[in-house]
Image (tube, grey):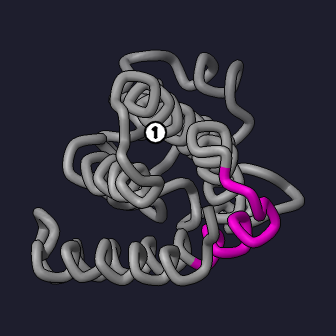
Amino acid sequence: MLDACADLVDQVGYEGLTTTLLAERAEVAIGSVYQFFPDKRAIVQALALRNMDAYLQSLSDRFAAETFTHWWDAVDAAIDGYIHMHRSVPGFRTLHFGDVVDLHLLDAERDNNAVIAERLAELLMEQFQLMDRARMRFALQISVEAADALIKLAFRRDPNGDEAVLTESKALIREYLHRHVSV
């Protein structure tokens, strides 16, 4: 059902998504949809959580498999992973991590980007033993917000992502973090 939801969101957007359309696309009875999800928001929330888990798992795997010379190379890898999801994961370009539906879709207490920033901070601090944890968390929250906005701009300008905007996004984030995070 989540795969069908992702495909539909790409075709009709969040507003056009209905549980009836989802049941038809997934080739299940409408009652089956409601057995697992009370409404379309819950379906989209499950899809956003799946996307977040896939994103963070791919980063964890990459961090474990590669040796990054500097922590900012790992940040570049995180941005590259987000761009890759925009290009390749059905429904992601529309939903991202759920902000289209609800800024608190991933966590009732924190907005979606704050959840992502926190998880990235944990990965980076674990990998690079960064000292100022509070400063890193704050800087990553600013960086995630900026990167998210700029990557969305890149994909509005070009369906495959405007390379000039993506390159500048990475440079901006790297420079910002380099000035604000001490190792």
Would residue 135 be counted in the magenta stretch?
A: yes
Where's residue 138, x and y in %?
A: 72, 73
| Furthest residue in direction right, as rendered | 109
Q: Residue at x 40, y 81 (%)?
A: 175
Q: Quick check: 138 above or below 105?
A: below
Q: Give the range drawn in magenta.
A: 130-142
Q: Nearer the viewer, residue 9 or 162?
A: 162
For mark 1, does the 10 Å Cα neighbourhood hold few (<14), some (14 to 19), or many (20 or more) residues?
Answer: some
Would residue 139 be counted in the magenta stretch?
A: yes
Q: In this view, does 163 lie to the left or right of 125?
A: left
Q: In this view, does 74 lie to the left or right of 53?
A: left
Residue 92 seen:
no
Q: In this view, does 22 lie to the left or right of 106?
A: left
Mark 1, residue position: 55
Q: Residue at x 58, y 44 (%)?
A: 128
Main SS class of the magenta portion in the image = helix
Q: Is residue 51 left or right of residue 109?
A: left
Where's residue 131, x and y in %?
A: 74, 57
Which element is circle 1 on? helix
- Count of numbered circles in the view: 1
Q: Residue at x 42, y 38 (%)?
A: 5
Which amino acid type is marked by label 1?
Answer: Tyr
Residue 68 seen:
yes
Q: Which of 15 and 175 is in front in this view?
A: 175
Where's residue 41, x and y in %?
A: 65, 50
Q: Which residue is drawn at 42% across and 60% down?
A: 72
Q: Nearer the viewer, residue 37 or 58?
A: 58
Q: Quick check: 118 above or below 164?
A: above
Q: Quick check: 62 above or below 173?
A: above
Quarter-wise, where is residue 166 in the image? bottom left
Of the 4 image quadrants, the one containing the C terminus is: bottom right
